[in-house]
Amino acid sequence: MATGNDVQFAAESGSLTFAQPVRNQVFALGRVARSFAILLLLAAVAGLIRSRAALAQSEGTEAKDASLIASERQVVTVPVIIDGRVLFRVRGVTAFPAAERATTIAQRIRAVAEDRAIPPSALYLVANDHWTEIVGGENSIMGVFDADAVAEAPGLSRQALAQIYLKNISSALEQYRAEREPVQLARNVFRIAGWTFLLLLVELAMLGSLRWLTVRIGQRYHSAIEQIETETFRLIRAESIWVAMRFATRLFALVAALAIFYVYLHIALDYLPWTRPLSSDLHALTIAPLLVLAREAVAAIPRLLVIVVIVSVARYVSRLARFFFSAIESGAITFSGFEAEWSKPTYNLVRLLIIAFAAMVCYPYIPGSRSEAFKGITIFVGVLFSFGSSSLLANIIAGYTMAYRRAFHVGDRIKVGDLIGDVTQIGLMVTHMRSIKNEELVVPNSVILNSNVINYASLSHKQGLILHTAVGIGYETPWRQVEAMLLMAAERTPRLLREPAPFVLQLSLNDFAVTYELNVYCDQPSEMDRLYADLHRSVLDVFNEFGVQIMTPAYVADPAEPKVVAQEEWFAKPAEAAAPLKISKNA
């Protein structure tokens, strides 16, 4: 129980104030009450949502049941067609479907129409308890039932529907026979011939108009199109505009010609009773598929516009990249550490990335891209590419690797394995070389990447390429004399560099001879074969002059006389005499 100390009344303010223990209990009860109220509110909202979902589900079920009942009540009817004209529509039952019933009625009508002994006025009705029969002569054409009248129109009697069917069948008999009269057939054939002649005249006139229009457009808009190319800095070429304009005019003429031919077929086929069904079905055979395609195309226009925008942006970005890297290749733009020869392969990589990115962005907007057929085709193409492109990708990657490694350039003399030649073209997949025998060598880039490459030209212009040849000389010849003769031979050889100076190395001391190596410098690697030949000639001449025998490649015994060629025999026939060489005695 609360005491005077626990409860105090504030008369001045009229408010009630609790002591601290009571205040805590009241606050705790308030929090519990608020929590309980929140739980009740959430439960009410959840119940309301569940009830609305149940109501929506029940309404959906009822609507579905109603639609099923309506579809079950809907009657399927098939037209009865004679010579392409629809007489009426009939229903069917499970044992006798509507299509089969319509075909049977049409066959009976044709049989009566071909029997000219039965006039159209001889058709009559025979009423029974459950159906009304339409009879032509002694042949039953069809029976009309109460269900037919109900399916045709509510409140229509069976007898009235039979009278309508009888009138339509009588008219069909009259038209069937009249259109097969010889006089009427001749008239229709003459009309078809007239329409055919008119078609030829129109087509010829359209062909002449197309030529005139093409010439007229070229005369009137030639300067304007050239100006467009100039103002767009050749981004839009005049030739492309002319191609587009010619394509547009020809496409328009083709569409107009096809439309005129379609109208001609529709008119010409309608004249003969045998071709009239084809004329009636011409729309379903030609226009209907085109309309379906047109609807699909119209529906895909927003996506196609997005694709056009993406492709256009990618194309212009690719052109800008080409201009940029062309400027780098020509030297108009330079970057530290970026070689000019890297511009072309780098542009190819950038263009590939642009195309891949554009294709990735365009893929969701391609019509039919989400279909299973499109996915299956892409998977099939991917599998084929993965199985058949291993060597292709290896060569492409090797080509780019070689481009950035700067192992050689066009015009360099290189050796790849056993192949030696001058580089004529470095492609993305293969490298073309010309051998010293003027043979074209085509080497896959993957082979070059996996082989040792010797480049004879990379250092030749700065430090010179060293050509070397070896000779074996006997021990009886002083080595100083041999080195002097080799250096003299180097001096006599044209097109060799004088600086750095040639030098001689003694490679080995063999059993019967000393092997000397003459090293000379040149700056023309592509002429190294001719330089070797000239150097060897000079070595032979110098050693013959001084009577020193070259003992390589093999030595058996000392001959009676040294194996040298006397100077007076240097130009023995058929060799031609040349100017005599002046030889220094102190050489």
Image: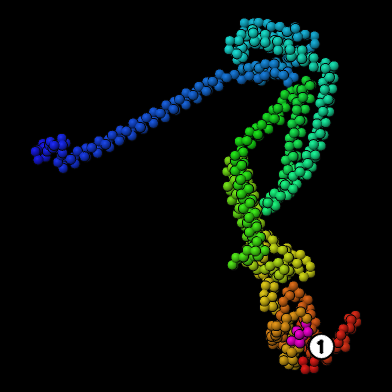
Residue at 64% x, 67% y: name it: 406
Residue 379 seen anywhere in this rendered image of the structure: no
Residue at 75% x, 39% y: name it: 250
* Residue 488 painted magenta: yes
Q: Position of residue 245 (x, y in %)?
A: 73, 43
119, 256: nearer the viewer: 256
Residue at 73% x, 38% y: name it: 251
348, 517: nearer the viewer: 348
Q: Quadrant of residue 448?
A: bottom right
- Judged from this view, the residue extending furthest toward the left is 4
Residue 435 seen anywhere in this rendered image of the structure: yes
Query: Is 323 placed above or below 228 here?
Result: below
Considering the image in quadrants, where does the C terminus appear?
bottom right
Locate residue 462 relative to residue 569 in the image: left or right: left
Q: Which residues are magenta?
A: 487-493
Query: Is 86 placed above or below 556 here?
Result: above
Residue at 72% x, 44% y: name it: 244
Q: Quadrant of residue 420?
A: bottom right
212, 101: nearer the viewer: 212
Does the magenta stretch mainly form a helix, a strand or a loop?
helix
Using a 10 Å C-alpha cutoff, classify the residue at mark 1 as few (fewer than 14 neighbours), some (14 to 19) or many (20 or more): some
Task: Give the amino acid at mark 1.
Answer: Asn
On the image, numbered disc 1 is attached to which residue?
544
Q: Position of residue 170 (x, y in %)?
A: 73, 11
Q: Position of residue 310 (x, y in %)?
A: 60, 47
Considering the image in quadrants, where does the N terminus appear?
top left
Q: Position of residue 274 (x, y in %)?
A: 78, 22
Query: Is 538 placed above or below 88 here?
Result: below
